[in-house]
Amino acid sequence: MTGTNSLDLQLPTLQATRQLARLISEHCQPPFTLVLNGTLGVGKTQLIRFLAEALGVPAEDVTSPTYVLLQRYSATVPIYHFDFYRLEHAAQVWDLGIDELYEQPAITVIEWGDKFPECLPEVFLECTIEQDAKEQRVARLVAHGDALAPMLQHLKL
């Protein structure tokens, strides 16, 4: 634990990533927003695939929405999966109607959310995935909004 609103986790295997996704699925309460940041290929979409799978979506149905910008999955609660990678202006994000989804009884997941922080809700869980010096994945989870801070206690692997 690095602070009351953040948590650093080692993700040395896909199984650890799957476990993190399962824990998020068990402890998030819609409306819930998860923002994923990290370089290309670091595992953002894989984490979302595991999260959706934990909520009842077949893993093979989950793909990166880089070119379509938004994927919707039917699960125990609806999942809206956005990818801001190709967007150039915040107006493009607002045009997608994302602000309306923040209040829906759903899970909203955003890849590359750090590109447009002004388009994020007040309360969200941010997960930044990086590789450390040993090429191991490390996830830094930050609870934005006091309501999510207690959730971090349940996400320890």
Image (cartoon, helix red, strand yellow):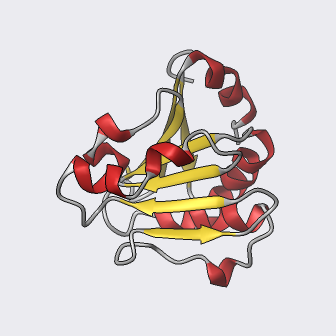
Q: Which percent across, then down, holds residue 148?
A: 63, 25
Q: For the point 70% across and 59% down, which residue is it?
A: 78
Residue sitting nearer the eye, 47 or 124: 124
Q: For the point 17% across and 58% down, which residue is it?
A: 88
Q: For the point 35% across and 40% down, which residue is it?
A: 119
Q: Which percent across, then down, holds residue 55?
A: 78, 61
Q: Quadrant of the N terminus?
A: top right
Q: Is residue 114 visible?
A: yes
Residue sitting nearer the eye, 16 or 84: 84
**Up-down relation of residue 28 to residue 81 (above or below):** above
Residue furthest left in the image: 88
Q: Which percent across, then down, holds residue 125?
A: 54, 36
Q: How many marks?
A: 0
Q: Quadrant of the C terminus?
A: top right
Figure quadrant of residue 65: bottom left
Residue sitting nearer the eye, 34 or 119: 119
Q: For the point 65% across and 29% down, which residue is it?
A: 152
Q: Does residue 72 appear left or right of residue 128 in this picture?
A: right
